Amino acid sequence: MDVFTAIRGRRSCRNFLPEPVSQDTIEKILEAAIWAPSPLNTQPWEFIVITNEEVKKKIFSEAERCRKWAIEKSGWKWLGSYQVDFVQSAPVIIVVIGDPKKTGVDMFQEEGGVGYQHACAAAIQNIHLAAHALGLSSIWFTFFDKKPMREILGIDPAKTPLALVCLGKADGDISRTPRKDVKEKTTYLR
Ligand SMILES: Cc1cc2nc3c(=O)[nH]c(=O)nc-3n(C[C@H](O)[C@H](O)[C@H](O)COP(=O)(O)O)c2cc1C
């Protein structure tokens, strides 16, 4: 699959089949993740691969707690239909953890200290594209509080769990989200 086809074909999946993902596939996806760029090549990412049902259950409880809190806090009624079941039904979750100490030279800049997050985001996108190229679907999940997630997964308090990428075979078709025209988003300074 060429890169443009992968980019256009990927879409967020929220319904997964219970079919397991092979170790070989998981390793190919992680190998794609680590070829992302990073500031000064600091490679600020670490990954936890979860297939354990008990751990998924704990993550689901935490995501549900967060969802209920957000409904109350925001007053957004539509959040009531926003489901997080996929964190339990996805056969695999790859947790992407960033190390703020590996952020590069931006640590000295006024609004800096975010280079590690950029690099991890690049790794996360590589995960999505690699998964798609291998016939899987995925979703980028960030709707959780970092402290309880660290506790559930035993993550060093100095490091940041940035995203959970849920992976597996899609159950049914996924509708395509629209995009605004690129012209609306681009300014040329010629
Ligand atoms: C940084 C980031 C965080 C996201 N967090 C969530 C999330 O917590 N829950 C969720 O259902 N989708 C999440 N998404 C997926 C977006 O909703 C999705 O990418 C967007 O609606 C566009 O749809 P597409 O991915 O199918 O093109 C996230 C995406 C990004 C890039």
Image (tube, grey):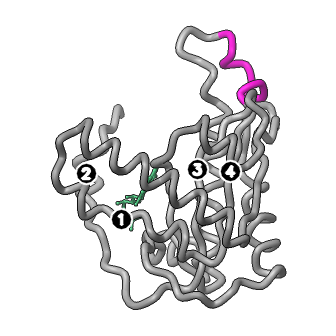
- Residue 80 pos. (x, y %): 24, 58
Circle 3 sits on which residue?
A: 163
Q: Which mark is residue 83?
A: 1
What secondary structure is marked by label 3? strand
Question: Which numbered mark, 1 or 3, is in the foreground of this view?
Answer: 1
Confirm or reject: label 3 Cβ below 8 Å from ligand 1.
yes
Say if the magenta span includes residue 127. no
Q: Earlier in the sequence, mark 4 or mark 1?
A: 1
Residue lying at 75% horizontally and 63% vertically, measured from the top left = 49
Asked if residue 75 is positioned above or below residue 174 in the image, the reply reads above
Give the magenta part as a residue range.
Answer: 100-108
Q: Report the residue marked by disc 2.
A: 183
Residue 97 locus on image (x, y percent): 70, 44
* Distance of label 2 from label 4 (alpha carbons): 33 Å
Q: CA distance from mark 3 to mark 4?
A: 5 Å
Q: Secondary structure at mark 1?
A: loop
What residue is at 63 percent from the left and 78 percent from the top? 91
- Circle 4 is placed at which residue position? 96
Q: Quadrant of the C terminus?
A: top left
Residue type, mark 4 in image: Val
Q: Marks 3 and 2, Cα distance to the nearest angstrom?
A: 30 Å
